[in-house]
Image (tube, rainbow, N blue to C red):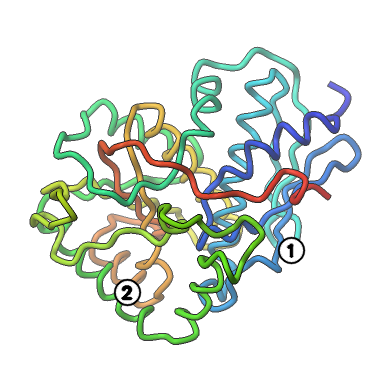
Amino acid sequence: MSGYTGDDLRRAATAAIRAPSLHNSQPWCFRLRDGTIEVLADRTRRPAVADTTGWALRLACGAATFNARLALAAAGTPADVLLRPYGELIATLTPARRRPPTYTERDLAAVIPRRHSNRRPFRPDPVPSETRVRLIEAARAEGARLELLVGTTALAGFGEIARSADRVLRRDPAYQAEQVTWTHADLAPDGVPVSAGGPPAEPQDLLPQRPYGERRRAPGRDFEPEPLVAVLATAADRPFDQVLAGQAMQAVLLTATDAGLATSLISQPIEVPAARDHLRRSLLRSGIPQIAVRIGYGDPGRPSPRRTVDDVLL
């Protein structure tokens, strides 16, 4: 294939903008240059207080890159991907040889519009072991590791770390003010915030008020008694690893969606450095935690609003 076209760019961006991002900030844009598609960081949309290092921006751009890759592959125009996350440029997608999509590429691309964070109670049905293996393999295929927290001790430990991190963030007035800016429609009228009555912006996720493993009440429903929580980790924590983690995260989320599962991202233990280090030392066998995911069977919801494709094309 000689090069990507404007139609390919629009196809890739249409899928990419469905990726999750901290506070639904959507810190990405896309450009066609010399027949390649470039994924760029839009640093004007990085939450400066919550994301001082650019970790969340790179995670989000990695997830957007994965969606773009899938959309191109599903159209028979797969990409060779070069990650360059040390400035504005995050990734370059160069046309590879045309071929039919694999079954996995086709299936995951099809569920991109359906994936969204679900912070409602999940049903108590356990996630089957074969599906757990699929999720682990999805992360591994992208160069990351997904560690499932098994047993009440691990779940309770994670719950305490998550609540402690949440308390730290709630005590920070600057953090709270920034969160309001990103999630309230009257302050951010460009499609980023949720509409009235909708779910909160990603990933302001449900955190337990009691240790994981205990029953918790929601209006008219119980939360699942023993949720499945997974921590996605990488070998290091360079900008490259964070973009890689974003791709792996999106692979896991789409694989879960394809399996009929609901997911929500839990970012607070990663946002607070002390909590992140505690999570690494106490619950991971190895690696650096990049995001936590709650996985289970939930009722259908709806995605958070997104910017239009025209807004993100350069």
In the picture of the structure, the residue carrying the numbered disc 1 is 87
In the picture of the structure, the residue carrying the numbered disc 2 is 165
Residue placed furthest toward the top:
100
CB contact under 8 Å: marks 1 and 2: no
Q: Marks 1 and 2, Cα distance to the nearest angstrom?
A: 29 Å
Q: Quadrant of residue 54?
A: bottom right
- In percent of width and height, residue 188 lies at 61, 66
Choose mark 1 or mark 2, whichever is in front: 2
Q: Quadrant of residue 213?
A: bottom left
Residue positioned 55% across, 73% down in the render: 181
Name the kind of residue labelled 1 in the image: Gly
Secondary structure state at the residue bearing disc 1: loop
Q: Is residue 76 left or right of residue 257?
A: right
Does 49 sit above or below residue 148? below
- In percent of width and height, residue 264 lies at 36, 49
Residue positioned 8% across, 57% down in the render: 214
Q: Of residues 5 and 196, which is closer to you in this image? A: 196
Q: Of residues 272 and 20, which is closer to you in this image? A: 20
Q: Is residue 60 left or right of residue 41?
A: left
